Amino acid sequence: MQHPNLQDNLSVSALVEASIKTGQGHLSDTGALMVNTGKFTGRSPKDRYIVEDDVTRDTVDWGGINIPFTPAAFAALEEKMLAYAAGLETVYVRDAYACASHKYRINIRVYTEQPWQNLFAYNMFLRPDGKKHSSLKTDEWTIYAFPGCLADPEVHGTRQENFSIINFTRQTIIIGGTAYTGEIKKGIFSVLNFVLPTQRDVLSMHCSANVGNKGDTALFFGLSGTGKTTLSNDPDRRLIGDDEHGWSQANVFNLEGGCYAKVIDLSESKEPQIYRAIRYGAMLENIGLEADGHTPDYEDSSITQNTRVSYPINHIDNIMYNSRGDLPRNIFFLTCDAFGVLPPISRLSPEQAMYHFISGYTAKIAGTEAGITEPVATFSACFGEPFIPLHPTKYADMLGKKLQQAEADGNPINVWLVNTGWTGGAYGTGSRMELTFTRAMIKAALTGALDTVTFQEEPFFGLSIPKSCPDVPNAILNPRDTWRNEADYDAMANDLAQRFHKNFSTYADQAEEVILAAGPR
C-alpha cells in the first residue's frame, strides 16, 4: 500500500516509545508494555470469514466456523480499509514470516494502525535474519489490521462492524473494528491450516512441542485451561514452541516465533519460565494493576479472563535454537475433565488417538464464562476447530497415516490422554489434579518408565490405564477408585460417554468405521 508516512520495521524500543507517547500503553514494573485492546478482549469467531471462490469452494468445510464471504464484498471492504489507512497520520509495517522450516516458509507483510499491534507481529511471527533462504514454495501474504475501520453490515454483508476476513486467492487478510491482536496471529494460523495440508503434505497442529536431551520430541495438544503451555515449558526439555506447529516427513517445526500465553493467576512458583519472560519487549494485554500503578495484578479478571502476554520465544531460556525437532516419540492430548471421569493418564491405540483428536474434549467450569454454573462439556475438533478450514477428518487422516508410518518404520509413537482436571468427584465435589502428579506422569511417559508397568482397561471409554507410575499414588490412577460412591461414578461416566457420542455424530459420515468403534463403549 502507498502512504506518506509508512513506519517500516521499527525497532522494539521505537514501537514501545510510540505506544507510550500516544497514550496507548505504559511500562510495567519489569519493563513489559501494558496495553488495553478496547471493546474486544478476545477473538470474535462469528465475525471471521473466508472468501468463497474457485480456490476454496470445494475444499473449505463451510458452516458456522468457516463462514463464506463473496469476492465482491471483500473487494469493497478492502477498498474502504485502504482509504481509511490513507487518512491516518502513520501506518506501521512489519516484514516477517511463518514456518521455521524454510522449505515451507510463508512471507508476511503486516500493516497496522497502532504501534503496539506492530510489536505484537514482531513478537509472534518469525523475524527475518537477513540471510537468503532457498524455498520450494514461498507465498507472500499481506495483513491489514486497522481497528478504526468499521464495516457497514448492510453494505458489506458482515454481521456487525468488526470483521476478520481471509482471501486465499488474493493471499490477503483484512481485520477491522477490533484491536484484539489474537486475530492477527490466528488469521495466519488459519491460512497455514489450509495451505500446509493441501499443498505441502504437512500436518498443521494446534499444539506445543518440546525436545528432551536425547532428541526425543513431544507434542502437547489441549484447549485453553488444560495446561498446554504450562506443561510444555519444562526446565528439563527444550521448547520448540507453545502453540502452533507443522509435522512434515522430516521433522516437527514451529509455525511462529513467539508465545501468546494466558496470564490469569500467573505466578512465578507455578510457571517460572513464562513469569520471567515478561520483561522489556513483552506486551501485556488487558491486565489490571496493583496499587502502585506499575505492577500487574495477574489475579485481576475485571477486564477479561483472557488476559494475555506476547513475547518472542527467545525470552525463554531453554529453547531449541532453530525451532525444530525430530519426529515425535510421544503425543499428549490434554483435557481438563471437570466431570472427574477420565483417568489422569491413559495410553491410546492409533484408532483411539484419531477419535480423541477429532473430538478435542475438555470442560468449562463455573466462573469461566457468564451463565456457567456447572461443568459443561466442550468439544473443539483437532483441539483447534475455530482455526481449521478443512473438515476435521482430513487432519485426523493425516495423523493416522503418520502413526501408521512410524509403526512400520519401527519407531512407534505413544499417544497419551492426560486429564489435568478433577479427581475424586466432579467439580464442586472432587479436587483438581495436583500439577506435581501430572508432571510426574508426563515425565514417566517421556522417559519410558510406563513401558514396563501393567495396564488395565476401564469399561466406559476402553482406555488403557497404568496400575502404577513413579512418584504418583497408585490410588489416583483409576478414577473410579477415587470416588466415594462407585455408582455415582458409573452414572457420570456413562453421561460423559453419551456426550462424546452425540458430538462425534457430526463427523460420523466422513469417519472410518475403525475410528467410530474406538469411541466410548
Image (tube, rainbow, N blue to C red):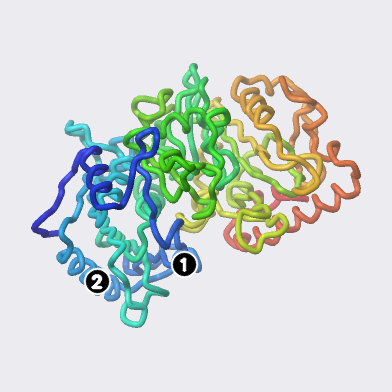
Name the image quarter holding residue 143.
bottom left
Q: Which residue is mark 2?
A: 75
In the image, residue 186 lies at what x, y percent?
40, 52
Q: Secondary structure at mark 2?
A: helix
State the residue at coordinates (51%, 22%): 235
Splitting the image into 4 quarters, where does residue 500 fall?
bottom right
Q: Amino acid at mark 2?
A: Ala
- The total number of labels drawn is 2
Whether residue 96 is visible, yes or no, is no
Identify the residue at the far bottom of this view.
Answer: 154
Measured as percent of width and height from the top left, residue 338 is found at: 71, 48
Between discs 2 and 1, the one toward the N terminus: 1
Figure check: 443 above or below 433: above
**In the depicted view, which residue is nearer to us: 18 or 223?**
18
Q: Residue furthest top?
A: 214
Badge 1 amino acid:
Lys
Of the 4 image quadrants, the one containing the N terminus is: bottom left
Check disc 1 and report its element: helix, strand or loop.
helix
Which residue ends up furthest to the left in the rendered image? 4
On the image, the x and y values in percent for residue 264 come to: 53, 44
Vertical side of 477 occupied by 113: above or below: below
| Other residues around mark 1 within 10 Å, as few (<14) / some (14–19) / many (≥20) | some
Q: Which residue is mark 1?
A: 46
| Label 2: few (<14), some (14–19) or many (≥20) C-alpha neighbours in 10 Å | few
The residue depicted at 88 percent of the width and 50 percent of the height is 488
**Which residue is depicted at the point 56% across and 41% down?**
265
In the rendered image, residue 280, in percent from the top left (x then y), is placed at 33, 34
Spatial separation of the CA atoms under disc 2 and disc 1: 20 Å
Q: Which of the two marks, 2 or 1, is nearer to us in this view? A: 1
* Left or right, 251 with reference to 155: right
Q: Which mark is residue 364?
A: none
Left or right, 102 with reference to 189? left
